[in-house]
Image (cartoon, rainbow, N blue to C red):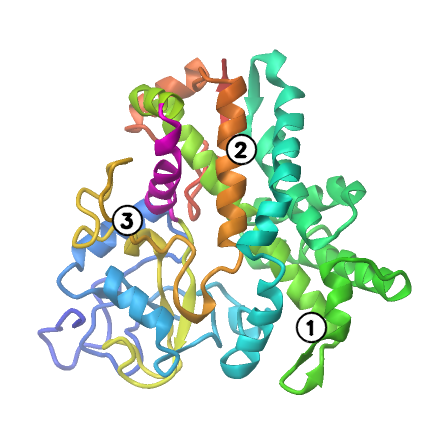
């Protein structure tokens, strides 16, 4: 991979006048926002296809790797890339999120202990509860003939499943829903970081988790929090601060991504009747269809920090490097016609859950939730679509729902009628 060559050896700014990356004066910085939508990531990546990367001069600056192979290699190569920074958002380097920002032996210990709570076997044990949750919620609105898929179904469904898996009291669901929705709203605020630290943002989440940890000290239970009281990592007992970080990460990572993938899949089927009819008629195709939805609608932009000069053939030590799943899973050299949903795709090595040492531990849990929700939804609501006004807007925008926000590809208020 090579960055754009600058014809003028003395050039220190890109075509927009933005300062170039330190030590990379030959690279032309792109005026590109971290919070751009996946389609914009793909557009700019296509312009730099021969380079395999581009550099944004926005904020503190960051590199974006654009090919499947380079992104997979970066996920796996801790000698070149560290998790000292996992985002290009302002202030990300100040956060310590367990186990996301832990490396080496301690990270392996955290994963080993946490993985026991999300094994395929344990997920199978939870599946009847997950299915009852889906049925309960659908039966609560099926007679209405219309719904906000995310807010009336997907979000409370996924959050309650997570609470059941972790051992949080289900009666706290409404409170945690308010926190989750406040943090979503923060993404579209003028200052997303400041908004996420508002009274109902991260401080409220950490307060809730801290109080829960305190309750479990006084009243132990058969749950994940209580289990951590006996854990040691790197030869030292796990502290309450570590517990708060760990449980907060489960909340932050375990809800929105699964909700997004469910909504994106249903939105596609609502707008593509042939695919919906096949999904209804051929139960055997559903697992492959879900994998294709996971690939096509991947929308997370995890980051790493370059551990040495020349990391990924582009970055200098200390620079932020993004590994967008939306680019890896749309690489045409790996996925022919990547923009087309193909339930019969012969080879689908997508990395919707990441790859390498930090691959998502909850992948089996997420897949089970998506497949179960889709089964129960289509058993009760086989024919559905967008409201008429949304259909007209979608037609004008080439199929994109007007409620789709920047950054994460998802219709937060996906309205459906039947």
Label 2 packing within 10 angstroms: few (<14), some (14-19), many (20+): many
Q: Which mark is residue 348?
A: 3
Q: Residue at x 19, y 53 (%)?
A: 46
Earlier in the chain: of badge 2 and badge 3, it is 3
Q: Give the SS element for disc 3.
A: loop
Looking at the image, residue 247 sits to the left or right of residue 99; the answer is right
Q: Quadrant of the N terminus?
A: bottom left
Report whether residue 188 is seen: no
Q: Give the SS element for disc 1.
A: helix
Q: Give the SS element for disc 2.
A: helix
Earlier in the chain: of badge 1 and badge 3, it is 1
The residue indicated by pointer 2 is 373
Task: Give the main secondary structure of the magenta stretch.
Answer: helix
State the extent of the magenta-drawn residues as a range: 282-298
Q: Position of residue 63 (x, y in %)?
A: 32, 68
Marks 1 and 3 close (CB-CB < 8 Å): no
Q: Residue at x 48, y 37 (%)?
A: 371
Q: Residue at x 71, y 68 (%)?
A: 243
Furthest-left residue in view?
A: 7
Furthest-right residue in view?
A: 218
């Amino acid at each position: 991979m090579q960055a754009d060559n600058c014809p003028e050896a003395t050039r220190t700014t890109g075509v927009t006048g933005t300062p170039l990356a330190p030590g990379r004066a030959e690279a032309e910085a792109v005026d590109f926002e971290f919070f751009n939508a996946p389609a914009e990531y793909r557009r700019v990546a296509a312009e730099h296809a021969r380079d395999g990367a581009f550099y944004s001069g926005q904020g503190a600056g960051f590199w974006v790797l654009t090919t499947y192979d380079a992104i997979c290699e970066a996920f796996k190569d801790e000698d070149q890339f560290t998790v000292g920074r996992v985002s290009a958002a302002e202030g990300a380097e100040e956060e310590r999120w367990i186990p996301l920002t832990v490396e080496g032996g301690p990270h392996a210990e955290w994963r080993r202990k946490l993985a026991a709570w999300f094994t395929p076997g344990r997920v199978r044990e939870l599946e009847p509860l997950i299915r009852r949750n889906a049925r309960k919620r659908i039966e609560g609105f099926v007679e209405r003939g219309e719904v906000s898929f995310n807010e009336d179904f997907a979000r409370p469904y996924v959050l309650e499943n997570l609470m059941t898996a972790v051992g949080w009291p289900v009666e706290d669901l409404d409170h945690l829903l308010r926190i989750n929705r406040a943090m979503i709203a923060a993404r579209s605020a003028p200052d997303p970081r400041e908004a996420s630290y508002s009274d109902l943002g991260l401080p409220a989440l950490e307060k809730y988790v801290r109080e829960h940890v305190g309750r479990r000290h006084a009243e132990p239970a058969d749950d994940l929090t209580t289990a951590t009281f006996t854990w040691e990592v790197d030869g030292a007992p796990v502290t309450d601060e570590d517990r708060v970080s760990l449980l907060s990460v489960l909340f932050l990572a375990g809800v929105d991504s699964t909700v997004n993938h469910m909504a994106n899949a249903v939105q596609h089927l609502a707008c593509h009747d042939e695919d919906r009819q096949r999904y209804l008629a051929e139960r055997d195709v559903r697992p492959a269809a879900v994998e294709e939805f996971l690939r096509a609608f991947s929308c997370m932009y995890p980051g790493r920090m370059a551990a040495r000069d020349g990391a990924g053939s582009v970055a200098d030590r200390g620079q932020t490097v993004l590994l967008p799943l939306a680019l890896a899973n749309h690489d045409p050299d790996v996925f022919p016609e990547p923009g087309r949903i193909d339930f019969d795709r012969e080879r689908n090595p997508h990395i919707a859950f990441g790859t390498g040492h930090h691959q998502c531990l909850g992948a089996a849990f997420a897949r089970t939730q998506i497949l179960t929700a889709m089964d129960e939804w289509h058993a009760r609501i086989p024919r559905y679509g967008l409201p008429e006004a949304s259909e007209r807007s979608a037609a004008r925008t080439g199929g994109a729902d007007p409620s789709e926000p920047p950054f994460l590809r998802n219709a937060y208020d996906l309205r459906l009628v039947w």
